[in-house]
Amino acid sequence: MSIEMTVAGLGIDPMSSAPVLVLTDSEQDQELLVAIGLVEASAIAMELEQVRTPRPLTHDLLCSVIRSLEAHLLAVEVTECKNDIYHASLLLSQGDRQVRVDARTSDAIAVALRMKCPILVSEKLLTESVVANKQKDNGHGEDSQTAADGARWAELLSHLPKADSGEYIM
């Protein structure tokens, strides 16, 4: 089972200066923060801001290939996190055939935004993310590392401007 999420925005991790992709569910009860590369952050930002280029970029090219093959991108699903790296799949259909294609999370989301398809996150992944934080518990009800991470992300999110809808914008 998966939960549909949207891109709430992009930010910068104040500790590493790395770009961070912020996904949130429709009720904004759950967030998934994904560290991504600068190039991928730029591709996502360009689509969020609806910046068009004179020639297609890599993610635009992939969208063109999918359309040219008369296939449809049904959804993108963030499926798991292994060794602190999120994994995703493109869920494609072509006629009666459905295919799942492995992809980097940032690339999958850049394509999903361009093709206006749902972004899904595995419930198991969201649960495991919460469990992983709880396993760091030092016996005082809260791990100092988890608390520091929470404070860091709160600081990160506090610097992102919010649109009238309550979503983070660039």
Image (tube, helix red, strand yellow):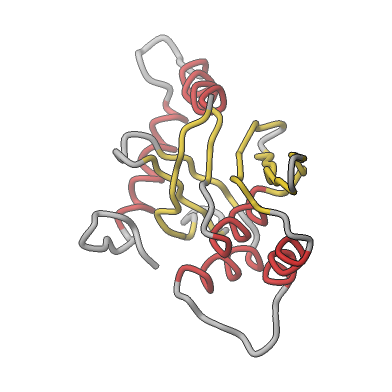
Above or below, comparing residue 133 to residue 30 in the picture: above
Q: Residue furthest top?
A: 139
At 55% from the left and 65% from the top, the residue drawn is 44
Residue 39 screen position, x and y as percent: 66, 68
At 61% from the left and 39% from the top, the residue drawn is 78
Above or below, comparing residue 83 to residue 44 in the picture: above
Q: Residue furthest front?
A: 95
Res. 8 image quadrant: bottom left
At 46% from the left and 56% from the top, the residue drawn is 14
Res. 128 image quadrant: top right
Residue closer to the observer: 79 or 147:
79
Q: Residue furthest bottom?
A: 54
Left or right, 165 with reference to 71: left
Left or right, 29 with reference to 100: left
Above or below, comparing residue 74 to residue 40 in the picture: above
At 56% from the left and 29% from the top, the residue drawn is 122
Residue 130 screen position, x and y as percent: 47, 23
**How many numbered discs, if any?**
0
The quadrant of the picture occupied by the C terminus is bottom left
Residue closer to the observer: 60 or 132:
60
Residue 89 screen position, x and y as percent: 69, 42
Residue closer to the observer: 145 or 158:
158
